[in-house]
Amino acid sequence: MKKLIVCACLSVALIVSCDKKQDEHAEHTATEQNVSNNHEHAEEAQSDGHANTVAGLELNNGKKWKTNTEMLPFIQEQEKLINAFDSDTGDYRKLAEDLSSANDRLIKSCTMTGKSHDVLHVWLSSHMKNIDLLGKAANREEADQITDALEESMETYHHYFNQHGK
């Protein structure tokens, strides 16, 4: 329960930090509601094993969305951590901590606005849930399934977002 609250707080922090450049009241409320709805859809899709079909996760008229350059190092850091993880000998709780730390810095660096911001939130909410689940994994077998989901999450990111912000 405590970790669920932390995840919710991180989501709220992401919303608040990213909404600074948008209209104070109207757009903030709309974005907050959209993220909340997308998070619910992400949870449903995750339980079905269909993370790529989450409502709201879409291409930008057939092209990848741009990710702001200040956010890229933290996305790349997470991907390196996931790729370097040895499922036979690695400490999955440490991996969850390191991913969570990189994710916190990602959230703080967010300057995206508009539709690309909203689509990133859809991906990020599911990604954050998997990080949280990894930290609570009961055993290595469960952790392996979650690290597989995190690998798929990074593939999903690459499908919808340009890694170089171009």
Image: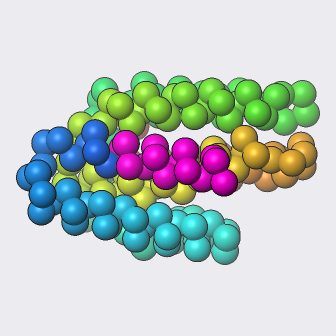
Q: Is residue 156 visible?
A: no
In the image, is residue 8 above or below residue 57? Answer: above
- What is the x, y in percent for residue 23? 8, 52
Res. 38 image quadrant: bottom left
The N terminus, quarter of image: bottom right
Residue at x 55%, y 45% (from the top left corner): 6
Q: Is residue 98 visible?
A: yes
In the image, is residue 143 above or below residue 100? Answer: below
> Which is more toward the observer, 58 or 15?
15
Q: Is residue 13 magenta?
A: yes
Residue at x 32%, y 30% (from the top left corner): 109
- What is the x, y in percent for residue 17? 28, 39
Residue at x 52%, y 28% (from the top left corner): 102
Furthest toward the left, the residue is 23
Res. 47 image quadrant: bottom right
In the image, is residue 90 above or below residue 130? Answer: above
Could you tell me how many numbered marks the image carries?
A: 0
In the image, is residue 19 above or below residue 62? Answer: above
Residue at x 57%, y 67% (from the top left corner): 43
- What is the x, y in percent for residue 24? 11, 51
For the stretch drawn in magenta, the main secondary structure is helix
Res. 28 image quadrant: bottom left
> Which is more toward the observer, 136 or 163?
136
**Drawn side of residue 71 relative to residue 51, left or right:** left
Magenta part of the chain:
1-14
Q: What is the basis of the colouring in this image? A: rainbow
The C terminus, quarter of image: top left
Q: Is residue 5 magenta?
A: yes
